[in-house]
Image: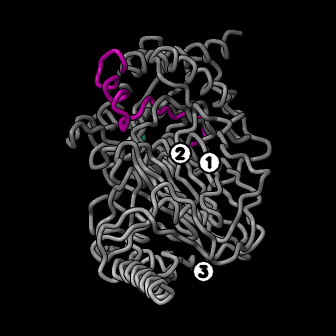
Amino acid sequence: MKQSRRNSLLRMTIQLLLLISLLLLSTMISFAIGSPDGSDHRLTIDGNLIQTSVPPYIENDRSLVPARAVFEAIGANVTWSPSDPNHVGISYANTQVSLTLNSPIAYVNGEEKKLDVPARLHNNSTMIPVRFVSESLSFGVGYDVDQRIIQLTSPKVEPIYGSVSKVSYEDLQYFYRVEIDATEPIKIYQDSTLADPNRYILDLTGFTLDASINEKLVPSDETNNEVFSAIRSSQFTPDTVRVVVDLKDKQTGAITLSPDEKNIYIDFSKPYIDNNNDTSDPIEIPSDPINPVNKKPANLNEVLIVIDPGHGGNDPGAQGKSNGAVILNEKDINLDVATRLNEKLQAAGLNTIMSRNGDHSASPNSKNALEDRIYRSNWANSENATLFVSIHNNSAGNVTSATGTETFYNETEGKAAYGISSKELAASVQKKMTAYLGTRNRGVKNGSELSVLRRTEMPAILMEGAFLSNPDDLQLMLTDTFRENYANAVSEAIIEYLNEMYQN
Ligand SMILES: [Zn+2]
């Protein structure tokens, strides 16, 4: 009895031991050989047990872990795009990971990486192979076979380095400058552009975003700003600050750093404005005499107006295109408007001369467009003209959003000798043009640096009617109405101004 009891106890113990070792063996086998075993593995990251809605599992010798749980545990940002539900984006520190469900290819910082098994959806969770986490993302991996635990160690992340203390912008003559100020030198940064909608993105690694920073900076001239609609700043990942410039047209920013590298400047070009402004223009402008000789004509009959149709001949000026083909050259519409203006001013009894009256340069000897513009000014001076009126239309190159009308004037003290304020005349012309043409008012601008205005001794104005680079403006410019209104606006403004000047 005792014997048999002992025997049976022994038998039970042996059976239990066998059972335990079988269980252990099966656990080991499931790790080593593997079978889709489902639900009872656990996951630790840096020693902390991670709660996962879908536990890690092993299939065909591969361990799979839930992507979101792994990455969120290390503070990474995991994104699913509703438009592309098969795509998973992960970013942390300075690492960007892009995964596609059921694809054996992933991208880590743009570099192609092979997965031993594709990422897949399992009970609504994206599962990724541990091997990918280890080899491509530099996590450490260990297995606790007894406890059925997959142990991940997060990659070493550079410690936070400084903070971004200010994000601002400046409205400069030819560009907008976005400035980012940091408390420490900016060593790691990466920029990129995205389309639909157009954005420029700059990531600064090793920084946190100061709490004082406005997350969305809207420019004060938002509706008239042709370059950007907002500057957004965020803590993109725990150690990366992301600045996004919402652009109106596609362009990339030009980056410069301050000498101490604590300030980064990103310049965004304003739309290119026609091609009258030549920084290569070599001649110095003579300074105006302090006591100008009175050159104001004694009466209206002695007033001489130069009408200057911009460009001509080999210089087409701006070009309006449709489906890649040129459908309008600026030189042609300029001449048409100038011819109409000439008729209207002459009909009012004023004396006029035109710098060109056909499709050619103003001077037969000009070697290039700049020389020809210089010639026009010198010629107007030699004719002792009272007023110089240059007819142009605009272009912003590939930027299609720029639209509207603007008027430039030259103004130095010497011009006072003529009794005409080109600035006042420009304002009157601009007002009538935007009213008659129905175009956006881009304002009256000092154009003293424009090559065609800088040498003219008499008051001078230059109109930019509308943009050949803007599809809507271009359609308007093809119409007779637009050209007639352009000429009417300028002639009426000039006639009113001169009548007021000479009414007494
Ligand atoms: Zn022009």
Whole-percent x and y of residue 25?
Answer: 37, 83
Q: Nearer the viewer, residue 409 or 326?
A: 326
- Residue 321 is situated, as x and y percent measured from the top left of the image, at 26, 39
Q: Return the residue at label 1.
A: 232
The residue that appears at 37% across and 16% down in the rendered structure is: 484
Q: Which residue is mark 3?
A: 156
Q: CA distance from mark 2 to mark 1?
A: 8 Å
Specify the segment rendered in magenta.
456-482
Relative horizontal placement of residue 168, taking residue 62 as reference (left or right): right
- Measure the alpha-carbon separation of dots 2 and 3: 33 Å
Mark found first going from the N terminus, 3 or 1: 3
Above or below, comparing residue 225 to residue 22 in the picture: above
Q: Kindly identify the amino acid type of the residue bearing the numbered disc 1.
A: Arg
CB under 8 Å between discs 2 and 1: yes
Q: Residues within 10 Å of mark 1 (few under 14, many from 20)?
A: some
Task: Identify which amino acid the numbered label 2 is placed on.
Answer: Asp
- Ligand 1 rendered quadrant: top left
Q: Secondary structure at mark 2?
A: strand
Mark 2 or 3, nearer chain start: 3
Which residue bears the numbered disc 2?
A: 246
Pointer 2 local density, CA inside 10 Å: few below 14, some 14–19, many at least 20: many
Task: Check the image and report above or below for 421 versus 117.
Answer: above
Report if the CB atoms under discs 3 and 1 are less than 8 Å apart.
Answer: no
Asked if one can make out residue 345 in the rendered structure from this viewpoint, the answer is no
